[in-house]
Image (tube, rainbow, N blue to C red):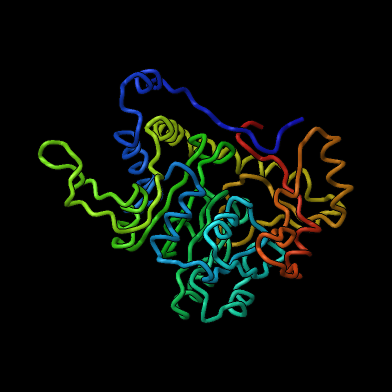
Amino acid sequence: MIPLYKPYMPELPEMQNILHSGQLAYGKWGREFEKRLADYLGVKQVLLTNTYGLAWQVLFRTLGLKPGDEVIATPMSCLQSTMPMAQYGLKTVWADIDPRYGILDPESVKSKITAKTKLIINYHFCGYPGYVDEINAIGKEKGILVVDDCIEAFGAKYKGKRLGNVGTPLSIFNFQTVRLPNTIEGGALVFKDEELYMKAVIIRDLGIDRSIFRDENGEISAACDISIPSVNATPSDVNSYIGCCQMEHIDELLEKQARNAKQWENKLFDMPSLIDFISRKDTEPNYWVCGILSGSKEADMKMFKEWGYACSAVHLPNTYYSVFGRQEMPKGVEEFYNQFIALPSGWWM
């Protein structure tokens, strides 16, 4: 059966040299991967982390969020995106989605804002860009920061620009095994604000200011105070080197995925139960999967599997998980989940 997901791994000609170099921690290749990401996205300030979950922890600490603060998000999300909120003690408030596309609904977001709302997370579902301008406008009007959650959406475009560079104050990316690029495990943050970026650099590295950490004798300096509760989230040069090698092939891989999605459109356009494909105007998905809406979800999933294609609903609505507190499933989420099918469109097809 053709899989829905598959890790990509290019040739790694320098890996043995790196492994035996004695320089495995964040260094040359970590800085190089950050540079390549920044150049690709067209931004200045990219901060790598060793995991996507710790990228969230760095972000929450950088923003000064406190347990009990409210965060607005969609329950139609990967648990990797939502669990960090529970770990940090934030109150996750579920907003509804547009059931045509699986993306956060701006009007629902407005209705969920309270005095305790500190962050809006705009999740770009399965690589399909959401309502960027509308959600950012709400954040600007209400004085609430917005973060684009691009966990599945690296390389996707909104109005001709790649996510990470579409005007949103903050963006987060995931480089886990089935993402593109993948570093086996890793994440990244993009900051528009330089002051927040510099603060995050310190928080990512145990609160250490490396420019004054050691004295003239190479000893840890008492003059370097550690004043912020921080995390150990710097990536290794091994993972970063893998990311650098993947970036050399990223455009080719994404182009293959777009062509494969087009093949699905040609194949399924007259399928009786097809409601629609979930792509929309002004967006270029990265086609991590090819998403469709079906009026006969279970029957169609059985059919695709009989054809030899793995398929899935991908994510269970997070309203099912009691860790986030009991909240009703929004109507748009329920409608979308009852119709959505993800089909494989990856580079391996």
- Report the residue at 77% width, 36% height from top: 309
Across and down, in percent, residue 60 comes to 45, 61
Q: Residue furthest right?
A: 299
Corner quadrant of residue 85: bottom right
Q: Nearer the viewer, residue 299 or 258?
A: 299
Across and down, in percent, residue 182 comes to 51, 37
Q: Is residue 346 above or below residue 95?
A: above
Please indicate whether residue 214 sits to the left or right of residue 192 in the image: left
Q: Nearer the viewer, residue 192 or 101?
A: 192
- Report the residue at 70% width, 41% height from top: 263
Q: Is residue 349 above or below residue 146?
A: above
Instruction: Indicate the quadrant containing the C terminus: top left, top right, bottom left or bottom right.
Output: top right
Q: Nearer the viewer, residue 45 or 329?
A: 329
Circle count: 0
Please indicate whether residue 189 sits to the left or right of residue 214 in the image: right
Across and down, in percent, residue 140 comes to 44, 76
Please indicate whether residue 302 sits to the left or right of residue 141 in the image: right
Instruction: Indicate the quadrant containing the N terminus: top left, top right, bottom left or bottom right.
Output: top right
- Report the residue at 48% width, 54% height from top: 56
Across and down, in percent, residue 74 comes to 63, 64
Q: Residue furthest left?
A: 216
